[in-house]
Amino acid sequence: MQPAKINTVYYKRKFLNVSDTFLTENAAAKKDINYYIQVPLNHGLALQEFHTLLIDLSATKEEIWSRIYHRTQTEITSFQNNNKFEHKIFNPVPQKNFAEHLQLLEKFTSLRKIRKPEKERLLAYNKEGILLISSIMSGTEIHCVNFYRVTEQRAVNLHSFTTQELKTNDHSSSFFGKAHRTLHWLDMLYFKENGIAKYDFGGWYDGNKDESLLHINQFKEQFGGEKIKEYSGAIYHHPILKLIKKILK
């Protein structure tokens, strides 16, 4: 892949003009909604703190591996040595593959009762060549999937899940856990080989009450990395949206 040098993407969401700006101090051209995603400055003091975990891909493969928990290393090695699998990468993502993986993601978010993926955003990223989908497969069976926004600066994990709860096959929880960790590791190596500077887990919960998010933190921390603080949020310019926001305050 050729890493993109891009920090803003413009797209339509129904009747609204939208921009996503990420990883830059620069402000975007004014649209109905300006999203700022993991930016270093709190534009207009309208954004919220966002914490994430970064892996430095400029380190050697051996250095990155050495920072992974020993037990996680063992699980990755075991999966690679004892299973026939394929590490699939789509970038840009063909329409058929996009639809297939998005359907799996939508089923997963529905079962977990978490926020649904934003199709318009993912389509816009794919049009700009910065959407990448990776998976671990055996034959036609998809075991786990990662969605990324990939630029020269970072590969940012947008969505990550296994198909265990979707009951598409009857593998054990241990199998899915090992496959999921292996997918992250192989993705890191792929991004490193293609000149991406950082691997970004796409968020780290800076709290102590939500057990589900703390569990996700534990998964991410197995790979080492540096915790950083950035800012994310939306600035509304459409008059109706501005009014709704004012009422809800």
Image: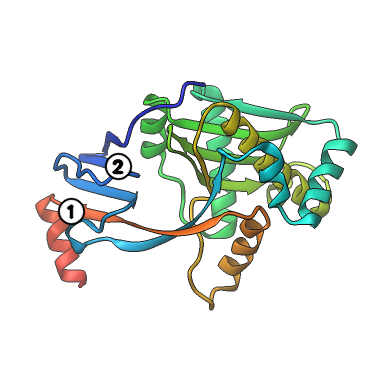
Amino acid type indicated by mark 2:
Asp
Residue 80: image quadrant is: top right
Q: Is residue 226 left or right of residue 142?
A: left
Find out whether the residues at labels 2 and 1 contact each other: C-beta distance under 8 Å.
Answer: no
Residue at far right of view:
82
The structure residue drawn at horizontal position 54% and vertical position 53%, both measured from the top left corner, is: 110
Q: CA distance from mark 2 to mark 1?
A: 12 Å
Give the crowd class for mark 1: few <14, some 14-19, many >=20 residues within 10 Å. Answer: some
Residue at far left of view:
239
SS class, disc 2: strand
Residue 90 pos. (x, y %) = 56, 25
Q: Is residue 175 left or right of residue 182?
A: right
The structure residue drawn at horizontal position 78% and vertical position 48%, both measured from the top left corner, is: 178
Q: Which mark is residue 201?
A: none
Q: Which mark is residue 20?
A: 2
Q: Is residue 71 above or below residue 83?
A: below
> Looking at the image, is mark 2 or mark 1 nearer the viewer?
2
SS class, disc 1: strand
Residue 38 pos. (x, y %) = 36, 51
Residue 175 visible in this rendered orientation of the protein: no
- In terms of sequence position, does the residue under pointer 2 or pointer 1 come before the other? 2
Residue 20: image quadrant is: top left
Residue 202 pos. (x, y %) = 49, 51
Q: Which mark is residue 236?
A: 1
Residue 159 pos. (x, y %) = 53, 46
Q: Is residue 238 left or right of residue 39?
A: left
Label total for image: 2
Amino acid type indicated by mark 1:
Tyr
The structure residue drawn at horizontal position 59% and vertical position 50%, both measured from the top left corner, is: 108
The residue nearer to you, when weighing 215 against 123, is 215
Residue 115 visible in this rendered orientation of the protein: yes
Quarter of the image with the C terminus is bottom left
